[in-house]
Amino acid sequence: MALPPRVVERLRQVVGPRAVTDPEVVASYTTDWTGRFVGHSPLMVRPRTTDEVAGIVTACRELELALVPQGGNTGLVGGGVPLRGEVVLSLTGLKDLEAVDDRAGQVTAGAGVALADLQQSASAAGWSYGVDIASRDSATVGGMIATNAGGLRVLRYGDTRAQVMGLEAVLGTGAVLSHLGGLVKDNTGYHWPGLVCGSEGTLAVVTAARLRLVPPMPYRTVALVAFAAVDSALDAAGLLRRALPSLEACELVLAPGVDLVCSATGMHPPFPVRHPVFLLIEVADRTDPTGSTAEAVETIGGVLDVAVATEPARRADLWRYREAHTEAINTLGAPHKLDVTLPLGALAEFVDTVPATVAAAVPTARTWLFGHVGDGNIHVNVTGLSPDDYRVDDVVLRLAAGLGGSISAEHGIGTAKKRWLSLSRSPTELAAFRSLKHALDPDNVLNPNVLLDSAGG
Ligand code: 2HG
Ligand code: ZN
């Protein structure tokens, strides 16, 4: 529904023509990347400064309009698109990226800086940024903080929460909270990054962050190691973590997913023989880790085949068997994505059980499994379901929680999983969540339909 002209005028007082009502432009902000979450909105605003963000939040509070903050729109749980007609607050205009502070090994970046640009600027200054995800070209600093993005290197450097040394954000009241000093030790009360990372735009709109950088590791070796069973691959992952302190990534893929990647991308299979289970590992160091990687792999039992790459192009080829899963699965229609974490002791049981659990719930559904097994995170993708058929989500999330896991490892709760949040959080925790939400966003302006039920559930 269109907004009254005086409302649009009020928002244009803050951002001028960057309050956009043209339906064609707005439409490109209302559907998520997978195509599963299709929303609608009367307006998209694109501020360029923190003051403009504060002005928009204040105006929306006065006008009783709900906002959905959005970064690169690469979220996967329906948390960044306006499913109930909210105004879209695009943060992609906040593109300031300061020079790297060499002494501190830190950088201050605006919420709209793309991960790939952050990585490039860190590397030009002789540093590296610890978090990497497949959607690096579009994903933004603000979105990664809001969802506490994890990705491929959590094993070594931790998730986004572990990188954020300071934060600037606009609360639901319109007040600007700024604590960007980047002190490594700072025990002066509540920790804003800890609170805001993973809050999915419900407590504050991130406008800038002070991020820690890590030393670059110029020598890299990637190996694709084949096994007969998930159990042996997980035993190997444990051994490799101990044997290789410079292990940076440890990913699991299975034969059906690799077959699908090959047919969707035209790539050749990795080995002449079709193996059932693979670990993709990357080891990165100050000196060439190829020898130590080969030695460590030799000590593992149950290895059926190994492909090793050190050249960048060949390394990228091996990574593609893993990273192209998301786009390959999307060729079958918008999947349901369940990014669960399991205790490592229960992961093999989960992987072995989940396809039958899905099939029992919806016999025509198809399960795809892959993920960051070094940290216990497995991505369950299910195709052959309509977007609002939640039978499979229900059984898979219950299975994960029943085995001691979490219903979200890194994508967040969004709108897709909020009805299952109580599987992972106690009533006391949820009550504390609601109190925090009320304190920082008393009029429920910021992403009111995400994470917690607006009714308070
Ligand atoms: C990844 O690990 C992303 O590549 C996306 O978290 C996972 O497509 C998915 O389910
Ligand atoms: Zn992932």
Image (tube, rainbow, N blue to C red):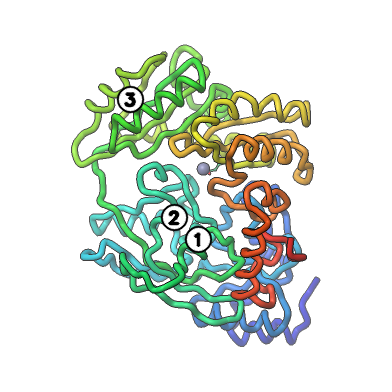
The residue under label 2 is 160
Q: Which mark is residue 308?
A: 3
Toward the viewer: 320 or 163? Answer: 163
**Distance (Cα) linking label 2 and label 1:** 7 Å
Label 3 close to label 1 by CB (< 8 Å)? no
Name the amino acid, label 3. Answer: Val
Determine if the C-beta at disc 3 is less than 8 A from ligand 1: no
Give the number of the mark in front: 2 or 3: 2
Q: Quadrant of residue 209?
A: bottom left
The residue under label 1 is 197
Percent x, y for residue 352? 60, 24
Circle 3 Cα neighbour tier, 10 Å, few/some/many (<14 / 14–19 / ≥20): some
Name the amino acid, label 2. Answer: Thr
Toward the viewer: 242 or 78? Answer: 242
For the C terminus, which image quadrant?
A: bottom right
Name the amino acid, label 1. Answer: Cys
